[in-house]
Amino acid sequence: MHQPLPAPAPRLWIRNPQAAFTANNLDASGGVVISGGVITEVLAAGQIPSEPCAETFDAGSHVLLPGLINTHHHFYQTLTRAWGPVANAPLFPWLQNLYPVWARLTPKDVELAATAALAELLLSGCTTAADHHYLFPAGLENAIDIEVAAVRRLGMRATLTRGSMTLGTDDGGLPPQSTVQAPEVVLADSERLIGAYHERGEDAVIQIALAPCSPFSVTKEIMAESAALAERLDVRLHTHLAETLDEEDFCREMFGLRTVDYLESVGWLTDRTWLGHGIHFSHEEIGRLGSAGTAVAHCATSNMRLASGTARVLELEDAGVPVGLGVDGSASNDASNMILEARQALYLQRLRYGADVPVERALGWATRGSAAVLGRPGLGQLAPGMQADLALFTLEDLRFSGSHDPVAALLLCAADRADRVMVGGQWRVVDGQIPGLDIAGLIAEHSAAAKRLVNGVR
Ligand SMILES: [Zn+2]
């Protein structure tokens, strides 16, 4: 008896896009072929697939990109967007006003906030999102489990970080004592989450990373213990570093160290680590980060919103630091829009380095660069063997009328919404909508939760 051969996966040809950005030197003018959740062929102008395709999607009115990848966020902050008391404040007072509000978060709040943030990201062309959640007040011990469920419902990929705060005001830290946890609780829960959810391999949907929050909210001990645990279980490490000069002053006073020395002293100056912000580094420190392969999530909008400073992205990349983009939390942006974030990063870096920073370089940060930051080499490019995570934009709105270069138009004319988004070969956005998600209902519930949260009504 012959065993029947398994049926070949159906093949989809996304044919002849209006334009394509591949994040490498491949010509994708003829489109891409998708099979089994991966890109099997990238076709140059005039080429056709090597084998017949069961389905064809005519992309003649679409600009095709690898799915955008967000490397730094705090989903729960969608509930405190544009909140009056901190609308015009720098980081430390911004945090001190918000910590007591965030300490009231409930499981339902986290579910609504994560869904809102992920849906907004997805509609902006984002296929993989990192989140940094570090608030676990009583009753919210399962915050990451709730986020995992939200990611799965939307069919995206995510690196969810088990954040922590262990240095409260009683011990010279910034957060109120009620928001910090004991280190043994943090480490046990970190290990539980990695065991329960962390997937390995290029097609991983959920990954877990460890993320003590920032130098001013955690002890050196939890930093070192998290690094050891990450090494033992082979997961990535994430934290905020060198975001503001206030933080640099704090490190000098508390630890007697500059930020990169502090990072090295706790065993984090490695290629396992990616840093949120990474602004205030000396030339010598940039060299050390590059030699170590430590990555940076550049959060242009948040850095402008809080007037934190301008990251030296070109110098970081030249030194060998992988750089990606992050929208950061929605209380310091206050949008969760990855294509607009690429525009902001382009313009902020042009302000530092000049108008010849190319549009394609900013799109590269949002795709291939962000994939490197999250340690996901199978994402962020259009190339054979890469995961079939795609974002397709149309240029039919008034804002694009009269534009010439379709790829440049995405950033220069401020594209803000994808028409189609694919994750692992599955369409997750169709005609600018997420099939199966009641956006109006989500907005109603999410806004009501946001009002209750800031008003202290539970
Ligand atoms: Zn952040």
Image (spheres, rainbow, N blue to C red):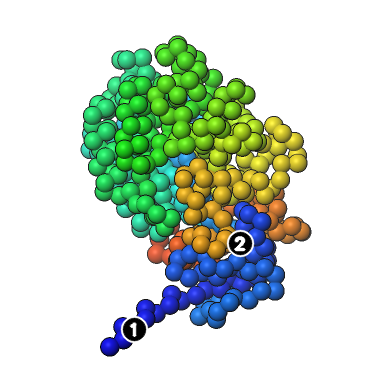
* Rendered position, 388 above or below 90: below
Q: Which residue is mark 2?
A: 64
Quarter holding the N terminus?
Answer: bottom left
* Quadrant in which residue 319 is drawn: top right
* Rendered position, 32 above or below 405: below
Q: Position of residue 4 (x, y in %)?
A: 34, 84
Q: Which residue is mark 1?
A: 4
Q: CA distance from mark 1 to mark 2?
A: 37 Å
Q: Position of residue 301 (x, y in %)?
A: 57, 37
Q: Among all residues in the image, which is located at the extreme bottom?
A: 1
Amino acid type at circle 1 is Pro
Amino acid type at circle 2 is Leu
Looking at the image, do the residues carrying marks 1 and 2 touch, with CB atoms under 8 Å apart?
no
Q: Position of residue 19 (x, y in %)?
A: 68, 63
First in sequence, mark 1 or 2: give its number. Answer: 1
SS for tag 1?
Answer: loop
Task: Tell whether 25 sits left or right of 72.
Answer: right
Q: Nearer the viewer, residue 134 or 29?
A: 29
Q: Residue at x 40, y 27 (%)?
A: 267
Q: Residue at x 63, y 69 (%)?
A: 43
Task: Tell whether 140 sits left or right of 349.
Answer: left
* Quadrant in which residue 96 is drawn: top left
Q: Residue at x 56, y 36 (%)?
A: 321
